[in-house]
Amino acid sequence: MLNVVWGVLDKVRNAARKRRWHPNHAFGRRGEDLAHRRLRSLGYTVVARNYRTNTGSGEVDLIAWEGGTLVFVEVKARRDDEFGTPDRAVDRDKRRRLIKAARTYVAKTAVDWQMVRFDVVSIVDGPRPEITVIRDAFPTRLAMT
């Protein structure tokens, strides 16, 4: 029952966004909403959304704790998977920008880098969106390369 209520609220919120925002921006935010809800249902505690560095050089869609691990989450949503799954868009350059933003966040919070992980949430839209959480999507050691 609660899922039905959340679904209706998502549709109302998304319709309002479409009127005010560019359609692609509204679609991306809807993807973040779906990812946020999925992660919470899996036991993550989301502590930040759309974190940006002070310099504007990096952004992280969601930051969450899963147990004792600080998880930086990139959300990728597509209307269909005609050109492959959305997670394929997280290329080497995007991973480097994510890691740079994560290092900035970790420095502010004094979290040990060994307690950090990167996940990707891949969403293919449809009547029942297909949401895939890819845990430990890429290694943190890329920060050194």
Image (spheres, rainbow, N blue to C red):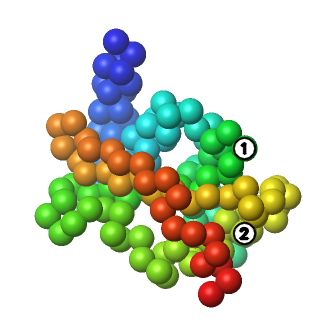
Number of residues whose C-alpha sits closer than 10 Å to that of mark 1, classed few (under 14), some (14–19) or many (20 or more): few
Q: Identify the amino acid type marked 2.
A: Arg
Q: Quadrant of residue 78?
A: bottom left
Say which residue appears at 51% left-offset and 68% top-offset. Answer: 138
Q: Identify the amino acid type marked 1.
A: Gly
Say which residue appears at 39% left-offset and 40% top-offset. Answer: 34
Q: Is residue 67 above or below residue 72?
A: above
The N terminus sits in image quarter: top left
Query: Is residue 26 visible to the viewer in this orientation of the structure?
Result: no
Number of residues whose C-alpha sits closer than 10 Å to that of mark 2, classed few (under 14), some (14–19) or many (20 or more): some
Say which residue appears at 42% left-offset and 77% top-offset. Answer: 91
Say which residue appears at 39% left-offset and 16% top-offset. Answer: 2
Where disc 1 sits, the SS reads loop
Q: Is residue 126 left or right of residue 64?
A: left
Q: Is residue 123 above or below residue 104?
A: above
Label 2 sits on residue: 103
> Quick one: which residue is furthest to the bottom in this view?
145
Q: Is residue 133 above or below residue 114?
A: above
Where disc 2 sits, the SS reads helix
Count of numbered marks: 2
Label 1 sits on residue: 68
